[in-house]
Every structure is written in C-alpha cells, then in structure tokens.
Image (cartoon, grey):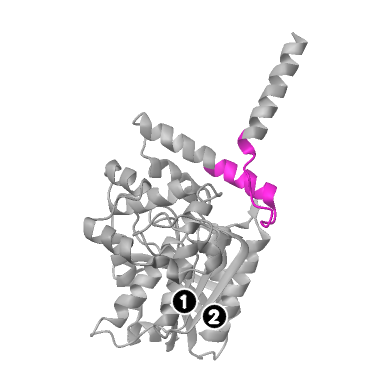
Amino acid sequence: MRLKGIFLLLSLGAFTAYYVYQPIPDAIEERWKLMLTDCFFRTLSHLADFSELVGMKDYMGVMMFITFAERVVPVSDQHVHVTEELFDGVEVVVYQPKLQGGDSELRRAVIYLHGGGWCLGSARMGPYDLLARQMVVDLNSVVVSVEYRLAPEHHFPVPYEDVYRVVKHFLQRVVLAQYTVDPGRIAVSGDSAGGNLAAAVSQQLQQDPEQQLQLKVQALLYPVLQALDLNTPSYQQNQNMPILPRTLMVRFWSEYFTSDKTFFRDMMSNTHTSPESAALLKFANWSAFLPESYREKYNYSSPTYVLTCEYDVLRDDGVMYATRLRHAGVEVTHEHYASGFHGALMLTMWPTDFLIGHTMMDNFIRWLQHNL
C-alpha cells in the first residue's frame, strides 16, 4: 500500500513536470517563471476549449477570467487624479496629474488602447492602470485609457468605431482645454490588438477632411497589423511560444470578424483569403520587408515607435510595418527585443512580475519623453 502511494505520488509529480515544462529559448530571461505563467494560461485555454465543446460557455467567455482576475478599481492617489467618464458614449478612464497651486501649463496627452485580441482585456486591469499612472508621473501627461467594446459580442468594426469616436471627441479644442492639454502634443498608443487599433485610427484621421487637429505620434507595442498571411516566418518560428501561440492569435482574428467556426478553420490553414487576395499574396513579395535572417529558414508563400519581440508570432507584422513606414518617408523608431516575448508589458505586477516588462515600459515612456 505504501509503495502504491509512493508510485502515485511520483507519477503525479512526473505528470505535473511534463505538463508545466515548455521548451523556451535560452535567450529569454526568467524562463521558469514564464513556464509557470504559461502553464496557467494553457490550463485556462484547455478549460475554455472543453467548456465550449460541451456547450457550457464559449471559449472567450471562459478566457475572460484573466481580465476579471486582474481587474482593479481605478482610484486617485497622491500624484494622480482618476475619473471614469464617457467620451461620445464610450467608457474611458482618465488619468491626470494632480494640480499644484497656480499650475496652468499645457500638458502632453496619451490615448491608450489595451490589448487582448479585441476579445479580452480592459482599461481597468492592474498592469494598464500601473502603466497609465507611470506615464502621468513621468511625462506630466493626461492619459485616456479606452474601454472599447469587445468581440465576440461586438464584432468588427465596433471596437474600432468605439476607439475612433473617443479620439475624435478628445481632439476637440474645447475638450483639450478642459484637461489642460497641448493640442500639438497628443499621442495614440496601444499594445497587441490595441496597437492595431492605434495604427488604424492614425491612418483614418489623416484621411478625414473635417479633422482639424492631428496626433503628433503613434506608439505601437508588439502590434498585430495584418491578417492576409498567417504563416509568416514569425508565425512559424513562434507557433508554440508561451502567452500567444499561433492558434490563439488566429482565434482572436477569427472571433474579431465572426463567430462562424469554419472561418477559424480556414484561417488556421491560411486559406481564408479571397481568390483576389490570394493572388496578391502569391505575387507580392511581402518578405522583402523582412531582414534576411528572418527569411532564410522558412518556407514563406507622423513619428512612429514600433516595439517588437523576437519570440512573438506578431514579430514580422511590426517589422514589415516599420519598414513600409520608412519607405513612405515616416520617421520610425523600431525597438526590437531579442529576448522579448508577446505580452511582456502586461507582466509587471506580482506574481507575474518580469524584469523585461519593466524594461519595455521604461524605454517606451522614455521615447515619449523625447518625441511627444
């Protein structure tokens, strides 16, 4: 009986070690911490798959646990005044420096769009609250963190439209005066799917003939920027990387557009494009926008800040976008983290507190200090 117990204990330990262990490149720091963090994400993902399979709750509904678990109530502190408001009907959290006596100097402003694959995430999550407060203190800026509606309940273009309405509302002189913001020092920024929305808003504003005020800079943090080809070298290299494996990124894209599962399967096989788009992909050399070192090993059929990570399926999206912007004459700062992985900027609070997340945040804010 005792031997049986020992055997069961050893078996359980071996199974746990097998489940927790995930091959992670040596270049990544704090590898075991990342393994344990990813173990939680994978377990939740498996539960979400099972829940959807048996008809209990849809996949994204279960994955929203991450958002709820990290949710905080944004409150004012000794340095930052926080209010929850509506900008043209869209929820926002506004962070402002606490006014000192006689302080009337115009400030910078950052409109920040959270990540989460358009399906998860919230402006009220702890890491985003921390980032917003840090920007207020270090930049003496106003930060508008947008609580846009999420897919799959609200498919494209609802999240984008929410964000665009917020930006248009904020870029009114009367509104900027209310928050003591300099009209010439406004940025839009976002991470992951938020980076996608930030890039889209920046482009749309420039094409709006009625828009008088424009953004000074955009800052895109490991952004997702294209769905034409979901088999780029970085999608292949990092298809099983922690936090954002290829399957999850493709699911995010699919849920953003539709709840039709056949579309998800088509995207997984990279056969989701129309015949016209497929022909474009066939004859366009997209890899021309990538360094040679990213192409050789794989079969591959206003000032802007772009952050990319080596171990991220979205690496090539950011690299290609930065290159195309440069070709168009845009001043670009491309900061690439050779040991970085997707989502690191969100891992800045205990117990998932990673040094690289703090490094990314510090460098991002430093760029804003010099360019906004």
> Which residues make up the magenta segment?
19-41
Q: Position of residue 172 (x, y in %)?
A: 32, 83
Determine whether the residue tagged by mark 1 lies in a helix, strand or loop: strand
Determine whether the residue tagged by mark 2 lies in a helix, strand or loop: helix
Q: With 14 as the anchor, is 280 left or right in this view?
A: left
Find residue 110 and name its label: 1
Where's the N terminus, which quadrant? top right
Q: Is residue 112 visible?
A: no
Residue 365, quarter of picture: bottom right
x 76%, y 12%: residue: 3
Mark sitting earlier along the chain (1/2): 1
Q: Measured along the vertical axis of the image, is residue 136 above or below residue 75?
A: below
Q: Position of residue 356 (x, y in %)?
A: 65, 62
Q: Measured along the vertical axis of the image, is residue 97 above or below residue 32?
A: below
Residue 355, quarter of picture: bottom right
Q: Amino acid at mark 1?
A: Val
Whether pointer 1 and pointer 2 mark residues with C-beta atoms closer than 8 Å, the reply is yes
Q: Residue farthest to the top?
A: 1
x 64%, y 28%: residue: 15
x 44%, y 70%: residue: 288
Q: Measured along the vertical axis of the image, is residue 309 above or below residue 175?
A: above
Q: Nearer the viewer, residue 141 or 352?
A: 352
The residue where tag 2 is placed is 368
